Amino acid sequence: MEKSIILDRDFDSIRRKAYAIRHNYFDDMDKYLLNLESSLLKKGLNVVWTKDRSSLTQTIESLINDLSVRRISFDSAFAFENHLQTRVDVIPFELLENASDDLDLLVVDADFAVCDSGSLVFLDKESQCCFNKTKNIAVIVNIDQAIANQQDLSFFIALKYMSKEHNMPHDVKILQNKLQYVLPSQLSYLSEQMITQEQMNVTVILHLNDIEEILSSELLKESLYCIQCGRCLDVCPVAAANDKISPIQLIKMNGLDKYNQTQHLFSHTTLCGACESVCPVNIPLVNLMLNEMQASNMSSTPSRTKQLYSLFSKRSKINKANKSFFRFFFVKRFFGQNKQLSRYFANQNTDFFNVSFQPPHEDNPNELIKDSDFE
C-alpha cells in the first residue's frame, strides 16, 4: 500500500467512492455478516454474537471463567476493568513487553473485519507486542467496522490514516488463519528446531453494539458509515473547547433513545460544518444533526430547545444580523453556564453557520427543500 493510493486522487471522488462502498455494505449487511461468520468458522475460530454492552461483558466474564483466567490485558474501547465481577489481574502492556510471564487472555478490538476472507485487521494496537504472549485471544469486531470485500481493505486503511502525521500505520497485523503460540518453556533452546508450538484459542465476538435503532432510520444509518479516523474530532471547535465528544459520537448517542441525549446535542454543536468537510466517507454530519434537532422540535420538548432549533433553522438571516449583538444574545442564553464554550464563541469572527441544510418536508420525508424556505 502506498500513500499515493489516496493522495494522487481527487478528495471528493475518494469520498464518493468510500460512501458508495459503505452504503453497499449496510444495504446487504445481513448477508455480509453471515459470510464473515462462515469464513471465521472455516478457519477454526470460535464465533460469538453479542447485542449490547451487557451481553458483551457477560461473554468476557464467561471466557474468564471457562479458561480459568488470572492474568488479562485489555486493548479495547470498552472499559471492562470497571464492570467485571470476576477478580482478575489486569496487566498493563508496558509491563508485558519484556516480561517472561505470559497472559491467560488478551482482549483486543479489531479495526476492520473483512467479510469475504474472514481477515481481522489490527492497526497500531497498544497490544502489538503481546499477541505471542497468550494462548487465548478474544477479538471484538464492531459490525459497523466490517468491510464487504478484501479488495477494499488497503483503500480504507489508507483512508483512515491519510491526514495523520505519518499517513500510514506503523504496525499492521492481519489475522487470516489460526495463530500459533510458541511455548515459553522451549524458548531457552538454541536450536530453532527444538521450539514447539500449539494452536491459539481465538474467540471472535461479533458485536452489534446496540445499533438496531440507528439501523432502523434511513437518515441516521449514514452515521454508521464512520471508519473511526478521528478527523471530525480534530476539527470540531466544540470538542476542543468542551469535553472531547466527537460530532459522530454526538449523533450516535442522540440516535439511541435510551440515552436521552437531545439536550446534549443542542448544546454541543455550532453547526459550523467543519466536521463534514473533512469526513473521508462523506457522511452528511450537519444534515444528520439538524434532522435530529427537527425530530426533537416536532416532539414535545422544552420551549428552550425549540427556540434553539428555530435559531439554527434561520441561520441565513442570523448570519446577516448584527453579529456582536447576536453573539452576546446567543452565548448568554444557550451557553451561559458553559464557560469554555462561551469563551470559544466570544473569540470567533466568522459566521456561526456556514453550510446549507436541506431538511425534508413533513408530508414527504424524501423530498428536499431549499435553505431559502427557512428565510
Image: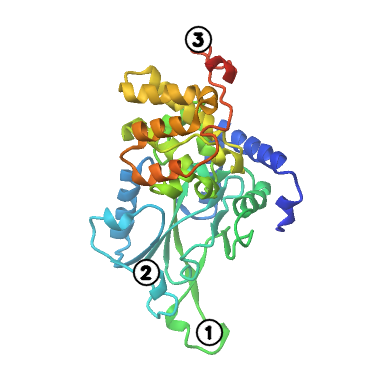
Lower sequence index among marks 1 and 2: 2
Residue under the image location 74 percent in, 44 percent down: 10
Q: Is residue 234 left or right of residue 50?
A: right
Which residue lies under the disc numbered 2? 92
| Pointers 1 and 2 in contact (C-beta within 8 Å) | no
Can residue 368 be seen at all in this image of the molecule?
A: no
Q: Give the residue type that dot 2 points to.
A: Pro
Lower sequence index among marks 1 and 3: 1
- Of circles 1 and 2, which is in front? 2
Image position, residue 238 (x, y; %): 44, 43
- Of circles 1 and 3, which is in front? 3
Image quadrant where residue 329 sits: top left
Which residue lies under the disc numbered 1? 194
Q: Residue furthest right?
A: 8
**Does 115 appear above or below 177?**
above
Spatial separation of the CA atoms under disc 2 and disc 3:
56 Å
| Pointers 2 and 3 in contact (C-beta within 8 Å) | no
Q: Give the residue type that dot 3 points to.
A: Asp
Quadrant in the picture for the C terminus: top right
Spatial separation of the CA atoms under disc 1 and disc 3:
75 Å
Mark 2 lies on a secondary structure that is: loop
Which residue lies under the disc numbered 3? 363
